[in-house]
Amino acid sequence: MEAAVRVIAQHGVRGLRVEQLAAEAGVSTALIYYHFKDRGGVLRAALEHVNQRAQDYTDQALSTTEEPRAQLENLLLLELRDETEVAMNSIAWGELRASAVFDPDLRDPLTATTRAWNDDVETLLARAGATAPALAAEHLTALVEGLSERWHTGSITLDRARAVLTHAIARELGD
Amino acid sequence: MEAAVRVIAQHGVRGLRVEQLAAEAGVSTALIYYHFKDRGGVLRAALEHVNQRAQDYTDQALSTTEEPRAQLENLLLLELRDETEVAMNSIAWGELRASAVFDPDLRDPLTATTRAWNDDVETLLARAGATAPALAAEHLTALVEGLSERWHTGSITLDRARAVLTHAIARELGD
């Protein structure tokens, strides 16, 4: 799965060939077909893996003893960091999102993952005193996706993306 | 160019073949190569066309005699509408954005277009009394991109996306 995320982050979903993935993972194509059935199975498993990594960031942000607002900032800003693993995860997520426009099979798992993310953020927003936590959660997570794609295409610097996100969080919390 | 936007919106940038585009446009492939040199030239021209259509929405929103705040809402919400041309334009824009992650040639025109959009929105935000119009403009336009991708992948309904955007605009204008 790490090999799949790497291949997707470097070449895109539509650049993902099972042969290339097998080479990257150091296994046979037969083993990949045995485990995942087909290319669609690989993509859904890769989405699950990306999601699990993002969930790890969430757990990390929530495990601190900080105030809800600081936890919320950590949770959202963790997605915008200059670290190879974070950037690869973020590129793979954006690419799976973009591919789902043309590949209906990816939509259900993507929607379920998006909903779980919204729920986590909504809980923290409610604790931090946001007046409309459900709307605010959907607002901030969609913004993270929009800013991430701009970051990965050079339309915004990472520092500026983080500043915009911090600004939007402050707007939701009444500053 | 309309044929190119249609093909991109239906099959993605990576599904765009010059042969298919020629068939869709009812011209020869030779004519396409003559005008655009190569596939990259077609993509850059398609981006320009998508941008021109978006600019038309902007002009439409700004030509009214409404208050700056109403103009701002119109301008941003015009991108989230249940109309075939708007949806195709939005899908093509998102797909060009996503492709630019893997295709550096698309980045400069995309960044220039994003900057022009931010500038228009910043001007309206300043007129409507926003306290940090530059940050707010980058916030709201990145949010439109994030919400559009969720809309096109079924992770949010169009009505909900519009409600989230309206909410975020209100947050920027101090409601």
Image (spheres, coloured by chain):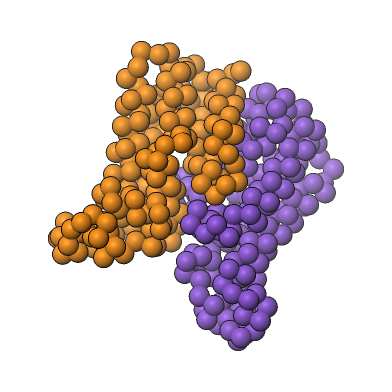
Chain colours: A purple, B orange
Q: Position of residue A85 (x, y in %)?
A: 62, 62
Q: Quadrant of the C terminus of chain B?
A: top right
Quarter residue A77 falls in: top right
Q: Position of residue B150 (x, y in %)?
A: 56, 45
Q: Position of residue A35 (x, y in %)?
A: 68, 78
Q: Is residue B37 above or below residue A172?
A: below
Q: Position of residue B5 (x, y in %)?
A: 33, 50
Q: Is residue B3 visible?
A: yes
A84 left or right, relative to B71: right
B117 left or right, relative to A119: left
Task: Give the residue at x 54% y 70%.
Answer: A7
Task: Give the residue at x 32% y 34%.
Answer: B55
Task: Give the residue at x 74% y 50%.
Answer: A58
In depth, the one of B104 and B59 nearer the eye is B59
B27 left or right, relative to B87: left
Q: Is residue B137 above or below residue B145?
A: above
Q: How many marks?
A: 0
Identify the residue at the far right of this view: A65
Quarter residue B159 falls in: top right
In depth, the one of A67 and B24 nearer the eye is B24
Task: Give the residue at x 59% y 26%.
Answer: B167
Q: Is residue A144 above or below residue A5?
A: above
Q: Is residue A91 visible?
A: no
Q: Is residue B141 above or below residue B127?
A: below
